[in-house]
Amino acid sequence: MRFKDMRLVCLVLMSLLVLTYGTGWSSRQLETNNVHLRGSSNVAGIAQQVAEVYMHENPDIAVTVTSIGTMRGIKSLIDATCNVAMASSESSDEQVKHAKDNDVSMTKHVIAYDALVPIVNPSNSINNLSIDDLRKVFSGEINNWEQLGGASQPINIVSYDGSSGNYETWKDVVMREGKVVTPTAKIMSANDMKKFVQQNPGAIGYVGLPSLDNTIKSLTVEGVKAEASNIKSNTYPICRELVLYTTKDSRESVNKFVEYFLTDKGQEFVKKAGVIPAK
């Protein structure tokens, strides 16, 4: 083969490799009927259990679940590197713009209802905080429990990173008024946050309903307890929806998986996870 012909063959092969692998997951997988979910860790645990049952009943469909945080999950859907985004907060203005710029129309499917609950060490005498109290605590304006009627002890704040739906909901509902979580806050996952609060008498964090247990003390907010009736009625101040986002041109296999999530069988996994079923 002449050198010129060999060079042409090499260029064609390189182009095929770029098309096949260079553009990542989307070019290889989104053209199949497989379902790939990315996003919130609050949804991922439930989605994984639903996926296992669904694949057993539909062996021709592969469902993968990747926990990368709500914000990254929604971005992945817009960028076509997944076909279902898992979210535990509303999409941001920036994401709405990103979707519009890319001519992507997202469809929202509420699968469950949840709440964020302030947690403290069981030794803490505080039982209730207002939204204003929480805002001042997490911004650093209030830095000692004595200012809230508790013991004279520094407040140690724990929060989540900016890609988390927990953080986004807390920012939207609690912080507001231009306030931000103090940069001195320790950034942790929910499990690490619980351990830190268990071990530190001055600590405060916030977790979703499934993380609540008797190793930590949950606070009421504005005198309202985070229980099912108050969350369903939106009486509890820090409620949120757990959501699956798809696009308007989703494949039938994707739509069928989301529909399955909302059947009695799918919603049973939601209930077992400790959040409130949407159906």
Image (spheres, rainbow, N blue to C red):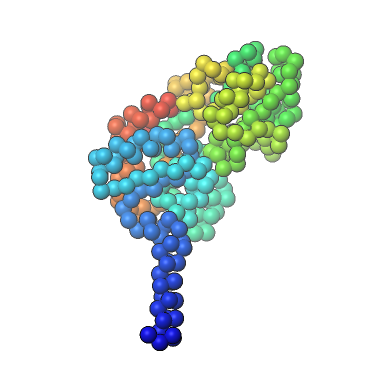
* Residue 198 on image: x %, y %: 59, 20
Which residue appears at 57% of the width and 29% of the height?
192
Quarter of the view holding residue 120: top right
Instruction: Look at the picture and state if 225 lies above or below 61.
Output: above
Q: Residue drawn at (50%, 22%), measured in percent from left and top?
A: 212
Q: Is residue 209 left or right of residue 176?
A: left
Which quadrant holds the C terminus? top left
Horizontal placement of 174 versus 144: left or right? left
Residue at image point 51% right, 56% down: 100
Position of residue 90 relative to residue 18, above or below, is above
Question: Can residue 234 be seen by looking at this rendering?
Answer: no
Closest to the observer: 271 or 232? Answer: 271
Q: Quadrant of residue 162?
A: top right
Q: Could you say which is closer to the camera, residue 269 or residue 131?
A: 269
Instruction: Tell me what residue is drawn at x 47 percent, y 29 percent.
Output: 114
Q: Is residue 83 visible?
A: yes
| Residue 186 coordinates in the image, percent (x, y) | 66, 32
Where residue 131 sits: x, y (%)?
Answer: 63, 26
**How many numbered dots are placed on residues in this image?**
0
Relative depth, front residue between 168 and 82:
82
Quadrant assignment for the N terminus: bottom left
The quarter of the picture where residue 139 lies is top right
The spot of residue 194 in percent (x, y) is 56, 25
